[in-house]
Image (cartoon, rainbow, N blue to C red):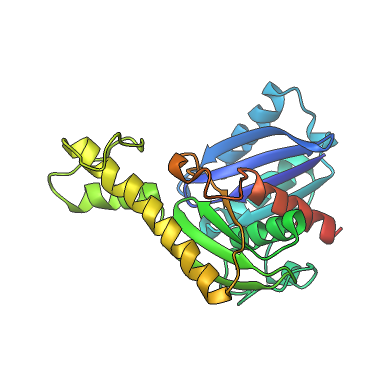
Amino acid sequence: MLLAIDIGNSDITIGIWTDEHWKHHWRIPSKPDQPELFYGVKIRDFFIESSLQVEAVNKIVLSSVVPALNEKVKNVIRTLFQKEPIVVGPKIYELLPIQVLNPYEIGSDLVANAMGAYIKFKRTCIVVDFGTALTFTTISKEGKILGVSIVPGLRTALKALSQNAAKLFDVPLEIPKSALGTSTVTAIQSGIVIGYEGLVRKMVSAIREELNEDCPAIATGGLSFVISPLKDFFHEIDPDLTLDGLRFIGKSVS
């Protein structure tokens, strides 16, 4: 049984891989101010509620883009599972079948995305990750990360708008019926959701033009469901791509 943990800026995503599929998915809010015990109890309770034995876990792969949580989660793993996790970072990159661009700068989640796409698709592709940041990671069919583009994620943009404009407020991330907003809520939804649809199309188009290749775009991330008008635009919507990348990394370094 493999345990994959992806510490993101908004959430910690946890997956259990067994019997050739992701049997369980869990999320914990990423809160650096919370004590180690908070995360330990959460993970322990997930296992108890799912009737899983911690002893059944034989490999743990950890990715993090939140340094303040690294030691807390690693200590939880050591205490709960009596194992050292494979921590995705520059030393691990050297063991992978992909070539990592700027290993001390790139986020380990983006490397996991690239690894997942490389193993699963075996062709040049663009991974669009709808998370706290909206990222575009392009990997060649030879396994080289060609580059990354980063913009604020949908929820991040929404939060910035409500915090910096006195008369605007947080609204649900829902697809508006019209581009012509007739209330503050629908106006913001129109601008964010429809605007980001255009951003994604333009960004992918620019990458394809630069590569002179009509490479497929793969969507992943917790908010990929929001841009449903892009459903047919993507070659595939794969919510487990990052976890799959961590799983493949675990295989590569075993």
Query: Measured from the top left, where is residue 1 in percent x and y?
Result: 82, 39
Give residue 143's quadrant in the image: bottom right
Residue 113, position in %: x, y?
A: 64, 57
Percent coordinates x, y for residue 222 in the rendering: 52, 43
Considering only vertical position in the picture, is 169 above or below 105? above
Which image quadrant: the C terminus? bottom right
Residue at screen point 80% across, 29% down? 53
Q: Position of residue 251 (x, y in %)?
A: 83, 55
**Residue name at image x 80 percent, y 69 percent:** 95
Residue at screen point 52% across, 76% down: 210
Name the side, left or right, on which 175 lies relative to 32: left
In the foreground, 149 or 229: 229
Q: Up-down: is 170 above or below 203? A: above
Front in this rendered view, residue 141 or 104: 141
Q: Residue at x 72, y 43 (%)?
A: 79
Give left or right: position of 56 versus 68: right
Count the marks.
Answer: 0
Q: Does 157 appear above or below 93?
A: above
Task: Specify whether 20 is left or right of 184.
Answer: right
Q: Residue furthest left?
A: 167
